Amino acid sequence: NVTSTWDTYTGSGVIISVVDDGLDHSHSDISPHYSSQFSYDWCDDDGDPSPSSRNGHGTAVAGVAAAVGDNALDVTGVAFNATIAGSTLIACWAGDSMEAEALSHENEDIDIYTNSWGPADDGQTLEAPGPLTLAAFENDAYSGRNGLGNLITWAAGNGLGSNDDSNYDGYANSRFTIAVTAINHNGEQSNY
């Protein structure tokens, strides 16, 4: 009973920050709604989140979230009129402080931080965010967007092939994040 919203809710006015390994903002499905104002590369300490040639995950995640609709290219994003920003973090991964900075970057304006990274998805690793990242989560939830709060989504199903459990992932199971997984066209959980 949600299909009626597809014609009216397009993500217009929403800013999504993809915290990942980079964002190819020149991609034709991304560039029309890309915002350099809300983007940052934590690895190179500059405003350009372009990925290296071996990093394409963040661009794929951005496409699922907000690829331009009805342009006859690739896919249409869930919120195809949303503004998309890139936050390059996991291409270098420098610890708790940098994670906290990326997850609170421009939190007065960014609506959603989407994340598809975290502890090893091997079914054995139990790990939680550090104290600075936890403080950033709490600040986002209670103070972001002038008290409305920011939404922080986290991938929950990346370790399906290893019988991983998102409850082992202290990022995905935090009370300040929303764990997200997907099902395929057969109603089965996807491997991501």
Image (tube, helix red, strand yellow):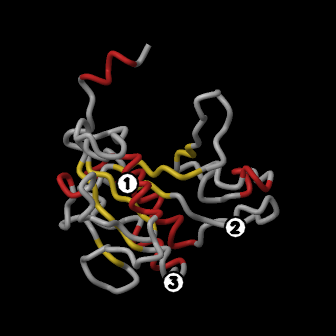
State how far apart marks 2 and 1 are (Cα).
Answer: 22 Å
Report the amino acid beneath label 1: Ala
Q: Nearer the viewer, residue 172 or 145?
A: 172
Residue under the point 60% across and 35% down = 183
Residue under the point 24% across and 77% down = 47
Task: Determine whether 183 is above or below 113 in the image.
Answer: above
Residue under the point 73% across and 50% down = 160
Query: Which of the labelled discs sits on residue 62, or is there none?
Result: 1
The disc, 2 or 1, on the residue closer to the chain's N-terminal end is 1
Residue 65's x, y, as percent?
38, 46
Where residue 69 sits, quadrant-wise, is top left
The quarter in which the N terminus is drawn is top left
Residue 101's x, y, as percent?
40, 73
What residue sits right under mark 2 in the picture? 120
Report the amino acid beneath label 3: Ala
Q: Residues within 10 Å of mark 2 (few under 14, many from 20)?
A: some
Residue 90's x, y, as percent?
50, 74
Q: Nearer the viewer, residue 28 or 83?
A: 28
Label 1 residue SS: helix
State how far apart marks 1 and 3 are (Cα).
Answer: 22 Å
Q: Nearer the viewer, residue 175 or 17?
A: 17
State how far apart marks 2 and 3 are (Cα).
Answer: 16 Å
Task: Determine whether 80 is above or below 91 in the image.
Answer: above
- Front label number (2 vs 1): 1
Residue under the point 64% across and 42% down = 190
Report the amino acid beneath label 2: Ala
Quick check: 129 left or right of 58?
A: right
Query: Which of the labelled discs sits on residue 94, or is there none?
Result: 3
Q: Residues within 10 Å of mark 3 (few under 14, many from 20)?
A: few
Where residue 130 sits, quadrant-wise, is bottom right
